[in-house]
Amino acid sequence: MHTHIVVLGGGPGGYAAAFLAADEGLQVTLVNAEPQLGGTCLLRGCIPSKALLHVSRVMSEVDELGAEWGVSYGDPAIDLDAIRGRKEKIIRMLSQGLGQLAKRRKVQVIRAHASFLDSTTLSLEGDETSGGNEASIPAEGRLTFDHAVVATGSVPSMPASFQLDSDRVMDSTGALQLKDVPGSLLIIGGGYIGLEMGTVYAHLGSQVSVVELQDGLLPGADRDLVKPLHKRLHELFEGRIYLETKVGALGAHADHVEVGFEGAGKFGTERFDRVLVSVGRRPNTSGLGLENTQVRLDDRGFIQCDDQQRTNDPNILAIGDVAGEPMLAHKATHEGRIAVEVIQGRPARFDAQAIPAVVFTDPEIAWAGLTDTQAQQENRNVTTSIYPWAASGRAQALGRTEGLTKWIIDPETNRVLGCGIVGPGAGELIAEAVLAIEMGCEARDLTDSIHPHPTLSETVMNAAEVFYGTATEIYKPRRDKRT
C-alpha cells in the first residue's frame, strides 16, 4: 500500500490533521492502534473526566442551595452503573461520530500498531480495518508514504516504586473507570488531573487526601489563582492536603494500600482503600521504530521538531503530546492543522501568543499568555490588574465571590500580555482573553467593548478598567493616569 499522508494516532491532533488533509483533497491514511477514534482525550481523559466533573458540580450546587438559600434535599443516591453508563454513552457517541466523519471524508482508517522501517515505510501489525473507502485494506503488512505525521499522544507516568500488582493502585485511566467509590482515596500529586479526579470522588462520597512534593497545589500556576481553589478543596477534602511531602513507599494488601509519608505535611504510615498516582504524563514515542529514521528525541522522550512541526527527518512531522509541552488537546489540534499546511508548501508555523490552560476543578482556573510567575522569572516589567469577583453582582447572585480576573499588561504600551481567571466558568471566559492577546489588544480595547450585565464576562472588562483606575464597582485609582 502507498499513501500520500499517513497519520499515526487517532486523537485530537491526529484526526484533525487527517480530516483537514482530506478536505484539501489529499490521499490520507490514519493508523490507529485502538478500536475507536478519539485518543486519550475522548476515550480516557478530557471528555469522560469532564462528564464526571459535571455530576460532581451539580451535587455541589445542590449542597450550596441548602447552605445559602434554604432549599434542601435528601442525601443523594449514587447509582454507579448509571453514571458509568452515561459516561460510556458520551464516549461511544462522539467516537462513532468521528468514524462517520472519516468515512465521509474517505480517510482510510487502519486499526494496527505502526512502526517505522525507514523514513518512507511503516510496518503494520493488527487485525481490523474500519472507515475509509470501500476497498479491503490489509491490517498487516507495509505502508509506504510521502509524508508521515506522528500523533501518538502520551501515557500516564508511573514511577517504578509505585508499580504494584494491585488494582488498588491506579493511574488516571483506572480512576476514570469508576469501579467503585472507595471509602478512602489518596492522590499522589497535586496537579490538575489529580485534583479533578479528587473532586469527583469526594462528591461521590470518598474521603480524599492529596500529597504534593512542592509547597503548593498546581505547581507552575500563579499563586493568587490557586489560593481560592486551595481553600475550597481544603474544606472538601476536610484538611487532608499534605504539601512538601513525598510518598516513601507503597505496600499493597488484599483490602488496602499502606502508604509511608515523609515530609513537613505528614510523616508516618496510613492505610487507604485506593491510591491514585497522578504525577504527570510521558510522550508515547517508544516502540515506533523512530531509531530507523532521522527523527531525534530529547532527553525526556519528546520528538524534536521546529515551529513548522518538522522533525530532523524531512518526511516526518510530529504534533501533540509527542512534540512537547504543554500536553493539551487544543494545542495538538492546532499543530495538526499547521502540519498539513506545511506539507502543502504553505508558510504556516506555530506562533501562538496564548495557549489557554484550564483546570476543571471547582472553582475552575484558567490562564493564557504571560503569567505572573513567568514575568517574575524573566524579570519583565509588567503591571498586574486584578478585579475581585466580590465586586461582581453576578458572582454575588451565584454565591461564588471567591474568584478573580486579572490582566498582565505592558505598562509602556498598555498591551495585554496575559490573563488569569479563577472562578466558576473560568474555562469559558478565557477565550475572550486568548483573542485579545492574539490580536495585540490594548487594555482600552477591552474597556471600550460593551459587556452584558449582569454576567461574569464583565469581570474581563472590569479588570482592564482597574488598570486605568476607572472600575465602577471598586475604588482603586491608578497612580499613573497615562492612556
Image (spheres, rainbow, N blue to C red):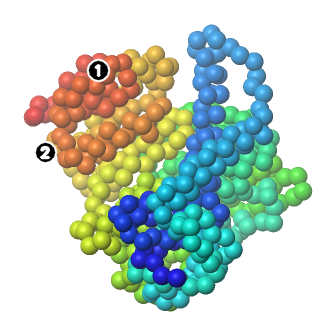
Q: Is residue 273 above or below residue 427?
A: below
Q: Residue at x 42, y 42 (%)?
A: 366
Image coordinates of residue 409 in percent, x first then y, are 23, 43
Residue 112 falls in image quadrant: bottom right
Query: How many residues crowd mark 1 within 10 Å: few (<14), some (14–19), many (20+)?
Result: some
Is 187 placed left or right of 356 in the picture? Answer: right
Query: Do the numbered discs 2 and 1 sit on residues whose CB atoms are within 8 Å?
Result: no
- Is residue 390 left or right of 463 when viewed as pictured? right
Check the image and report above or below for 482 versus 327.
Answer: above
Instruction: Work out whether 173 lies above or below 130.
Output: above
Give 196 or 87, whichever is nearer the viewer. Answer: 87
Q: Secondary structure at mark 1?
A: loop
The numbered mark at residue 413 is 2
Residue type marked 1: Ile
Q: Is residue 159 visible?
A: yes
Which residue is drawn at the image coordinates 64% and 11% (left, top)?
71
Disc with the residue nearer the chain's start (2 vs 1): 2
User: Who's the residue at 45% across and 87% down the image?
Assistant: 119
Q: Position of residue 350 (x, y in %)?
A: 31, 63
Image: 439 above or below 362: below
C-alpha separation, residue under disc 2 versus residue under disc 1: 24 Å
Numbered disc 2: secondary structure: loop
Identify the residue under disc 1. Answer: 474
